[in-house]
């Protein structure tokens, strides 16, 4: 059986020293207290000076301790504030992303609204509109430039009819089906549109290049200078396109022939107007056919 530990101080020198110093400090504290009590009773001014001296020494220590305690207390608050601010920042970022999507949708709706209003105003002004239809596809990579319209013979669309957008000429109807039509764009190499310059009425031809642009070629004059930004519109020559429809604008300075950018880009259009030709060919009537018909002459009588 292990011997019980002896807790008396006589068997440990460290305990003896600790007990001794504790007694000394207790006696010293009691003596200092008695001395201060005697001084405060018999010499209050001296006690006040001593008290202020001790206070002057203890004030910086107390201030340092108070600051340390304040810093220690502020650490949890700072950590909590960081987490709170981090969470609020994430919420604000999500809100900004949602607002950005809503703003984008609002801008798209406003843009579509402006285009459709312009198209509606154009339809109200024009008396030759056959149908308003959607451009469902357009070729942008091949050498030929066509577009597909979701309206055909059932809606009154016929080959040769001009097609335009709110701001400019798109092309003309090339082929028609029951409910669809194929549009030859002004940028196709087979497209030739008589145009004139708005500044001085200079006649020219707008020929498609097959790369999304057109060539403006002077027809009656030489050494004609073209400047960037000059606008060309249809003339009505040929009887297909009504006069005054914007076609293209010059992209760079040139002489006699210049590269121009179409005003109406098919890739940026949703809807287009199909109009009747400016000068349609008169339809033949039975009366006119009878008037122009020459009856065969009877053979002469036999002698």
Image (cartoon, rainbow, N blue to C red):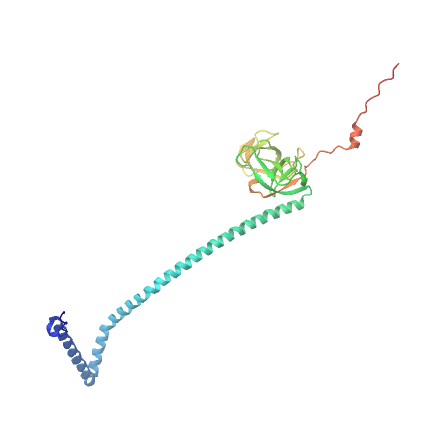
Q: Is residue 30 above or below residue 184?
A: below
Q: Which residue is nearer to you in this view: 296 or 2?
A: 2
Image x and y of residue 190, in percent: 59, 31
Q: Is residue 167 above or below residue 191?
A: below
Q: Which residue is nearer to you in this view: 282 or 47?
A: 282
Q: Residue furthest right?
A: 303
Q: Residue furthest bottom?
A: 42
Image x and y of residue 91, in percent: 44, 58
Q: Residue furthest top?
A: 303
Q: Is residue 27 above or below residue 176?
A: below
Q: Which residue is nearer to you in this view: 299 or 70?
A: 299
Q: Quadrant of residue 155?
A: top right
Q: Quadrant of residue 160?
A: top right
Residue 50 appears in the rendering: yes
The quarter of the rendered structure image containing the C terminus is top right
Residue 265 appears in the rendering: no
Q: Residue at x 23, y 75 (%)?
A: 55
Q: Residue at x 42, y 57 (%)?
A: 90
Q: Which residue is nearer to you in this view: 137 or 202?
A: 137
Image x and y of residue 125, in percent: 67, 45
Image x and y of residue 52, in percent: 23, 77
The quarter of the rendered structure image containing the N terminus is bottom left
């Amino acid at each position: 059986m292990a011997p019980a530990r002896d807790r008396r101080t006589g068997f440990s020198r460290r305990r003896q020293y600790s007990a001794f110093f504790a007694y000394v400090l207790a006696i010293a504290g009691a003596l200092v207290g008695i001395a201060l009590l005697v001084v405060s009773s018999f010499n209050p001014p001296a006690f006040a000076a001593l008290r202020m001296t001790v206070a002057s020494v203890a004030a910086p220590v107390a201030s340092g301790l108070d600051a340390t305690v304040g810093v220690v207390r502020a650490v949890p608050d700072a950590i909590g504030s960081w987490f709170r601010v981090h969470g609020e920042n994430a919420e604000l970022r999500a809100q900004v992303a949602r607002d950005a999507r809503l703003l984008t949708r609002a801008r798209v709706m406003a843009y579509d609204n402006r285009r459709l209003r312009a198209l509606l105003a154009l339809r109200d002004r024009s008396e030759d509109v056959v149908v308003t239809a959607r451009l469902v596809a357009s070729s942008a990579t091949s050498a030929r430039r066509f577009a597909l319209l979701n309206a055909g013979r059932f809606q009154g669309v016929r080959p040769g009819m001009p097609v335009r957008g709110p701001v400019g000429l798109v092309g003309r109807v090339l082929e028609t089906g029951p409910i669809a039509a194929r549009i030859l764009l002004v940028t196709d190499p087979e497209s030739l549109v008589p145009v004139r310059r708005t500044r001085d009425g200079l006649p020219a031809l707008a020929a498609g290049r097959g790369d999304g642009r057109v060539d403006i070629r002077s027809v009656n004059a030489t050494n004609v200078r073209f400047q960037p930004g000059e606008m060309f519109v249809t003339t009505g020559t040929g009887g297909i396109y009504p006069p005054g429809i914007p076609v293209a604008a010059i992209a760079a300075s040139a002489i006699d022939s210049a590269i121009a950018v179409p005003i109406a880009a098919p890739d940026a259009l949703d809807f287009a107007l199909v109009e009747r030709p400016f000068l349609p060919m008169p339809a033949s009537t039975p009366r006119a056919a009878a008037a122009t018909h020459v009856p065969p002459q009877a053979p002469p009588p036999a002698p």
